[in-house]
Amino acid sequence: MAGEEILAAVALTLATKSSEALAEGGRAVFAALARLVKRRFQGDDAAQTALAEAEVDPSDDTRIESLREELAQAAAEDPAFDHELRRLWQDLTPYLQAGSDGVVNNLSGSVGGNVVQARDVQGGISFGNVNSRAPEAGA
């Protein structure tokens, strides 16, 4: 996602307070993102107003664009903020991918067998014996 698209997505996500529909890990990342933005906007009346107005009516494209512009200005003025904003957005993105009827599976750590990501499975799923190895060629 290009830089301006990321800022537009961040603005919309902040305005809609999407954290309410997220799994626990996603809510924590969203909260960190919101704290980062609010901390950066402290003392900047225009930025705080843009955020507050976008939260009041997230369906208003003009308000979202105003918030995106404030985020872009803050990111341009503060490379550390820009870096952290993009890092948190990258961490949050997997939690935002599924629609209302979608599924998001996050897998981390070590996996000692097979993994399947599926939705609406009818019938069974079989992997066989995960501890057995296929015979080597020529054996």
Image (spheres, grey):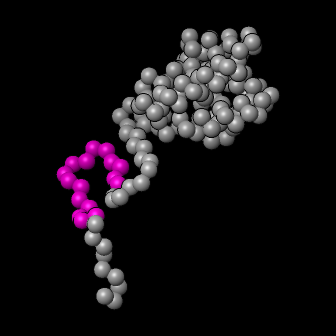
Magenta stretch in the rendered image: 115-130
Tell whether 131 sits left or right of 39.
Answer: left
User: In this view, which residue lies farthest toward the bottom?
Assistant: 138
Q: Which quadrant of the rendered structure holds the C terminus? A: bottom left
Asked if residue 15 can be seen in this view, the reply is yes
- Relative to residue 16, is residue 123 depicted above or below? below
Residue at image x 33%, y 89%?
138
- Relative to residue 128, is residue 47 depicted above or below? above
User: In this view, which residue lies farthest toward the left?
Assistant: 123
- Relative to residue 72, is residue 127 depicted above or below? below
- Front residue of this view, candidates 26 and 52: 26
Give percent across and percent down for residue 2.
67, 41
Residue at image x 35%, y 85%?
137
Residue at image x 23%, y 59%?
126
Give percent across and percent down for residue 90.
58, 39
Q: Is residue 46 magenta?
A: no
Q: Which quadrant of the rendered structure holds the N terminus? A: top right
- Front residue of this view, candidates 95 and 66: 95
Give percent across and percent down for residue 11.
62, 25
User: In this view, which residue lies farthest toward the right?
Assistant: 77
